[in-house]
Amino acid sequence: MLFKKVDYALAKLILDIEQGEIGLPEIQRPFVWKATKVRDLFDSMYKGFPVGYLLFWANDHLESTRHIGTIQKQKVAHLLIVDGQQRLTSLFAVIKGLQVLTKDFKEIYIRIAFRPRDSHFEVTDAAIEKDPEYIPDITKIWSPSIGIFKLADQYLSRLRTSRNVDQDEEEQIKQRIMDVSNLLNYPFTAMEISSTVDEEQVSEIFVRVNSMGITLKQADFILTLLSVFWDEGRAQLEKFCRNSRQPAIAGPSPFNYFLQPEPDQILRVCVGLGFKRARLQSVYSILRGKDLDTGEISEERRNAQFEVLKNAQEQTLNLTNWHEFLKVLIRAGFRSKSMITSDTGVLYTYIMFLIGKGEYKVEPYTLRDLMARWFFMTTLTGRYTGSPESDMESDLARLRTVGSAEEFINTLMSIIKDSLTDDFWNINLVNALESSSARTPVLFAYYAALNLLDAKVLFSNMKISELLDPALRAKKSATERHHLFPKGYLAILKITEVRETNQIANYALVEWDDNIDISDKPPWEYFPDFKKRFLNPDELASMLEWHALPDGWESMEYFEFLAMRRKLLAKVIRQGFEKLMG
């Protein structure tokens, strides 16, 4: 048998977690539920409802595990939680009154309140803190320093300051508080997987018994190996990702306005750089020290492969490299996360940047321009959106025979030119612009092109690059997407389908106050007024060209206008890219 069934009382589970007998394996992340789910869990247990099986994995072969909570344990866990981590983390945190890590790597307390009058659980907030009907933090029910009888007396004393409590209700309240305390006797059933089962089998078991859970990926198992054989490396990845989310008070930081990566995403960069691979399936075996031909596992081979990974991670997490790369995105016309439709595309470009910088020693100025063209191309064509691993594997394979900086540049430029043919610009791109999606790569490529062309916002003297600056944070966005043919006007024309009214070709960037002034006026009514702002006909001509507005557009039939403008939008995107090409 691959597993055995074991029954636990909650008190035993809490004790084993506290002592470190039960730990969290790296294939599950230490992130807790929202407080409302924790509340619902306690409510279900109180009512005697089942709350699901637990799935453990016997730990006779892993040397390091992650414990629940933020305190250090004395023992190495002999059982690892594969399924049920969110439940046990939540129960442990509330019952012991300990902090846990959130998804943003912050340490928090989970506070749940209980109202004995009707046995109601709630998430504690300021109003509940003041309400004498509630015990605002049920953690105190299990606190040895207070005691349940003292807590009940304190609660009743406070309740009596707001209303009368007769003898029968007092007994009922005490019993219900005792019922909460007795949740420590709640029975759980766990399936314990044998230590002889490997990570791949554990992943398959996890998916089969918990189809609603997080599917375990190859990256999760590689992160497991880091925890076992190079825990410092795993910690470095997590620190980098944590610090990318908030500006540093002092000193250098990976914080940026483009990407707040997860550890497994940065791991992909390290793997791509170190092993020239995008598919992680074989990398897991390589890092275990497995010979892919013979199947034999060697400690010497494992150590050598980890050295490769360590060197790659050092380059990946280097803050100078990181911020030099982020300049590539700005050089390509992209200003912030709001213009990024694929984190994978950003990170795969970072791999290419690091290879060009570290392995081929491409001159920095040349490398920045090359990678800006590469990123623009991959974004515009959606190169890494369909089968990203396969496409990146193919791109990396082309570099295995490249021996110089010149060959590296020529290889990437060849891919760019093969991707952006005349047919692409004149047919594929025009067709891709026939979309009503608010977040499509071709739309943000158009915005990037406007930035590259130093274009101004429609009807404004402010540059688009200035108003798209992520440092500008106000209640109202500096720019808004304006319907050139307003929806109210289109409704008069009996055009109401969203896929028709919200076409990309019906949008332009304007300042928000202009958007309000235009309202639902037809273009033939509002456009002449805005034209008066431009006394210089050359300025008006540039404005119309940047925003792909054909002569007489304001009086065109709507669908004729859309068809004409899609072609002009494609032309502007091409002009922006050609400027990037120099």
Image (spheres, rainbow, N blue to C red):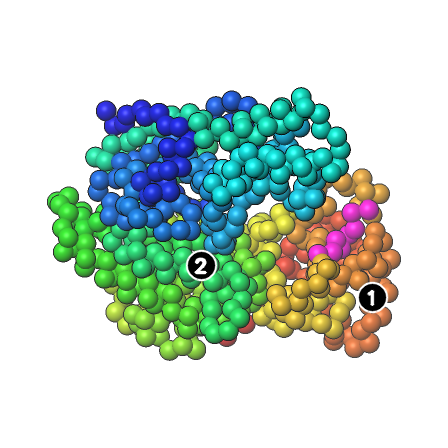
Q: CA distance from mark 1 to mark 2?
A: 46 Å
Determine which quarter of the picture holds residue 150.
Answer: top right
How far across and down, in percent of the image, does residue 274 sit? 28, 61
How far across and down, in percent of the image, does residue 420 sit? 48, 59
Relative depth, front residue between 277 and 153? 153
Q: How many marks?
A: 2
Q: Is residue 266 above or below residue 471?
A: above
How far across and down, in percent of the image, does residue 440 sit? 57, 51
Q: Is residue 311 magenta?
A: no
Q: Nearer the viewer, mark 1 or mark 2?
A: 2
- In which quadrant is the N terminus drawn? top left
Q: Is residue 183 visible?
A: yes
Relative depth, front residue between 439 and 25? 25
Residue 200 placement, left or right of 535: left
User: Residue at (55%, 33%) from the top-left corner?
Assistant: 149
Numbered mark located on residue 241 in the image: 2
Q: Amino acid at mark 2?
A: Cys
Magenta-highlighted residues = 481-488
Q: Earlier in the sequence, mark 1 or mark 2?
A: 2
Numbered mark located on residue 530 in the image: 1
Q: Amino acid at mark 1?
A: Phe
User: Residue at (22%, 40%) from the top-left corner?
Assistant: 60
User: Residue at (30%, 37%) from the top-left corner?
Assistant: 79
Q: Is residue 91 above or below residue 241?
A: above
